[in-house]
Amino acid sequence: MLPVKGICMEMCPKEEMMMRKSKRLVHQLECNPHKMVKCFSRSAAGNSLSKPHILRPTPVLRKTISYLLNEVLTIKNVPFNIVYDFIDDRLNSIRQDATIQAVSNQDWITILPPIIRFHAYAAYKCYEYDVNTFDPFLNMKHFHESIFKIVKILLEDSDRSTDELCSEMVSLLVVTNLGDYNVLQQALPFISKKNTLINMAVLLSLNIMNGNFGQLCKTYNTFPAIHQCVMSVQLPMLRKNILKSMCMGFNCKNNYYPISILSRMLLHNESRETIKECQHYCLTVIDDKVELTKSSFNNEVDELHLIKEIKFKVNISTLVLNT
């Protein structure tokens, strides 16, 4: 049986627009009635999701992604968690429409990358939000669903025209899961002498898996900004492991290590954050040095969530749409 093909040429089907208006379910970010966007919905009895008139074909899906990430993502007068929830729901609806229609691999290659970049950026942007305001696990679930799908497609349909995208997506998957052996295995088919970004990501992940953290400090700033977004949210865990490892290696009373050097190793924004981190793990700080001893390090406390500030060279819409 051939998959159904959508014929809805609007971002939101008229049927849904009328229903949501009548029930006062129009989102605050949909104040313009001509720019309502189809919601994500689950299949239920008597509610078929495969009707052609409610499914949007690929060009409309691409247009909707562009609208969401060009116009909605840049809204400043609404809290970002509300903007995120709206875009996340509408992007899920886009993936749902594409899945129901069984769009081609080539169509997926145009649909998924901006969605993946959006979730990577959101992981960084919403990192310090309360879990009741932003669910980082659900965000990364949507990220992984999309990136695993596109990596699988790139492996099956290798083409020189997708080399740049392949480099970005595979390396992004690796640095999102630093030290993860299973992810490294999935990256192996893409390793080549010519692909610097993938090789750099794999080497970093291998070093972290083996407890060699020096590579992180050396290469962090050489990765693209979208990669730094997903790396930055892993830094609290990595910093704890770095400090623990150093306390084991430098274990000696009255052996003090300069805060300025440690700050660079821990990728902190400034020295006071390094001091705060050391004190959090019960290490003694005197002036501009810290005593690294195995007996002092408190491994029982939770990681200290200090975000690494990222300086974006382009606006966010350009970053996620890669325009």
Image: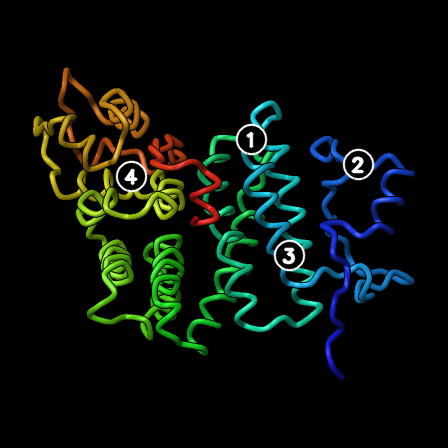
Which of disc 4 and disc 1 is earlier in sequence? 1
Count neighbours of disc 1 (C-alpha within 10 A) and say few if under 14, some if 14 to 19, many if 20 or more: few
Which of disc 2 and disc 4 is earlier in sequence? 2
Which of disc 2 and disc 3 is earlier in sequence? 2
Q: Where is residue 165 in the image (x, y as percent from the top left)?
A: 39, 62
| 57 horizontally vs 120: left or right | right
Foreground residue among 285 and 89:
89
Viewer-side label of 1, 2? 2
Quadrant in the picture for residue 259: top left
Viewer-side label of 1, 3? 3
| 290 horizontally vs 84: left or right | left
Query: Disc 2 on helix, strand or loop?
Result: loop
Which of disc 2 and disc 1 is earlier in sequence? 2
Q: Residue 239 carries which label?
A: 4
For image coordinates 35% across by 53% down, the residue present is: 175
Viewer-side label of 3, 2? 3
Instruction: Kindly indicate whether the residue at mark 3 contacts the one at mark 1 (C-beta within 8 angstroms).
Output: no
Which of disc 3 and disc 4 is earlier in sequence? 3
In this rendering, the answer to whether 309 lies above or below 88 is above
| 314 horizontally vs 262: left or right | right
Q: Which residue lies furthest to the top in this view?
A: 287
Instruction: Kindly indicate whether the residue at mark 4 contacts the one at mark 1 (C-beta within 8 angstroms).
Output: no
- Residue type at mark 3? Leu
The residue singled out by tag 3 in the image is 61
Query: Disc 3 on helix, strand or loop?
Result: helix
- Residue type at mark 2? Val
The residue singled out by tag 2 in the image is 26
Viewer-side label of 4, 3? 3
